[in-house]
Image (cartoon, helix red, strand yellow):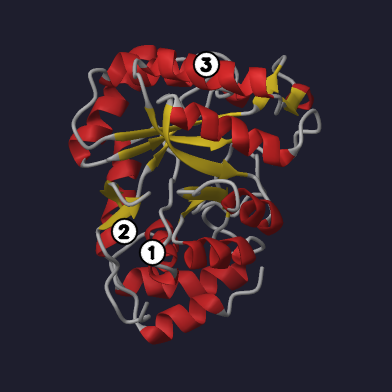
């Protein structure tokens, strides 16, 4: 993609699902530390409905968010789903308590089959449009057998497209020998490009690359967001934001959209104001000098 080209407004997942270039990560619509239900239930419902009215066409969730309460909130707010809305979810993690140390990856076939079917039930759908294996770190089953389980679920009509989350490039390539992979999600943003090899692999394979925490300068798995960063980062980003009458978050998102045609960021928020600002980043076109300056940032 030319660095001078304005970002496209849509992206295709799996060849047959067309969504806007910026989606919504719904993880924050849970309780403190991502445990239990979202504290203001009615506000959560209102926010999700407002997000759809604003043009969001992809929502990203997972069974471990809550656990389960995130999927249930989405269904309560949005079912029956508007035509063209894609709700992507994930399975393969369990969490036994509020303590993040209780989080564990599970990959055996019976568990994954149950997880996918229960996610479909909670979301109120017969078939999940995009279902991710949530982790490549399960030790109770070979990685290849986990992909084979998802292929079986696909053939049974439980899931439409297979995605991967928290995997290595080697796992991504191994999975592709078993089944088409429509999307891969990973931590990736302006200051953390450690998953650049995975982005390159996804591009080459025609898979969508879905960065999570796309505007945050906080390490992965931290529920907070910091879009200020160091003085060095602000010295580069703030003048660019000012030139575009944009926020720093919008510049981060615009950089991602122009980084690759394959990128579909899913910033998380519970504020409709922030969500509208995120979507507006689709209209920010950075020039070559601006992109070069952003590329040169070293965390």
Q: Which residue is mark 1?
A: 257
**Left/right of residue 213 with respect to residue 249 in the rendered view:** right
Residue at mark 1 to residue at mark 3: CA–CA distance: 31 Å
Which sits in the foreground, 122 or 172?
A: 172
Q: Earlier in the sequence, mark 1 or mark 3?
A: 3
Q: Position of residue 41 (x, y in %)?
A: 38, 13
Question: Tag 3, which secondary structure?
Answer: loop
Which residue is at 65% across, 18% downward?
A: 111
**Left/right of residue 168 with respect to residue 253 in the rendered view:** right
Classify mark 3: residues with Cα within 10 Å, few (<14), some (14-19) or many (20+): many
Q: Which residue is mark 2?
A: 281
Q: Which mark is residue 68?
A: 3
Q: Determine contact: label 2, label 1, CB under 8 Å.
A: yes
Question: Tag 1, which secondary structure?
Answer: helix
Q: Position of residue 209 (x, y in %)?
A: 48, 55
Which sits in the foreground, 172 or 214?
A: 172
Residue at mark 2 to residue at mark 1: CA–CA distance: 9 Å
């Amino acid at each position: 993609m030319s660095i001078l080209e304005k970002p496209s407004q849509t992206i295709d997942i799996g060849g047959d699902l067309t969504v806007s270039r910026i989606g919504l990560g719904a993880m924050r619509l849970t309780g403190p530390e991502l445990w239990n239900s979202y504290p203001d239930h009615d506000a959560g419902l209102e926010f999700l409905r407002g997000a759809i009215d604003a043009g969001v066409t992809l929502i990203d969730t997972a069974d471990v968010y809550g656990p389960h309460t995130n999927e249930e909130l989405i269904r309560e707010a949005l079912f029956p789903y508007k035509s063209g809305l894609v709700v992507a979810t994930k399975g393969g993690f369990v969490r036994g308590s509020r303590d993040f140390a209780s989080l564990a990856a599970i990959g055996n076939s019976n568990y994954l089959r149950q997880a996918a079917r229960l996610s479909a039930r909670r979301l109120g759908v017969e078939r999940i449009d995009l279902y991710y294996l949530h982790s490549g770190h399960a030790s109770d089953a070979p990685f290849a057998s986990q992909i084979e389980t998802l292929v079986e679920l696909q053939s049974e009509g439980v899931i439409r497209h297979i995605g991967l989350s928290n995997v290595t490039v080697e796992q991504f390539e191994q999975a592709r020998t078993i089944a088409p992979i429509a999307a891969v999600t990973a931590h990736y943003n302006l200051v953390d490009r450690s998953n650049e090899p995975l982005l390159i692999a996804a591009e080459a394979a025609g898979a969508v690359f879905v960065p999570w925490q796309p505007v945050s300068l906080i390490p992965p798995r931290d529920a907070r967001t910091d879009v200020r960063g160091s003085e060095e980062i602000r010295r580069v980003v703030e003048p660019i934001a000012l030139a575009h009458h944009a926020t720093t978050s919008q510049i981060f998102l615009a950089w991602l959209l122009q980084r690759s045609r394959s990128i579909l960021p899913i910033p998380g928020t519970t504020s409709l104001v922030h969500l509208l600002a995120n979507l507006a980043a689709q209209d920010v076109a950075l020039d070559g000098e601006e992109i070069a300056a952003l590329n040169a940032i070293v965390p």
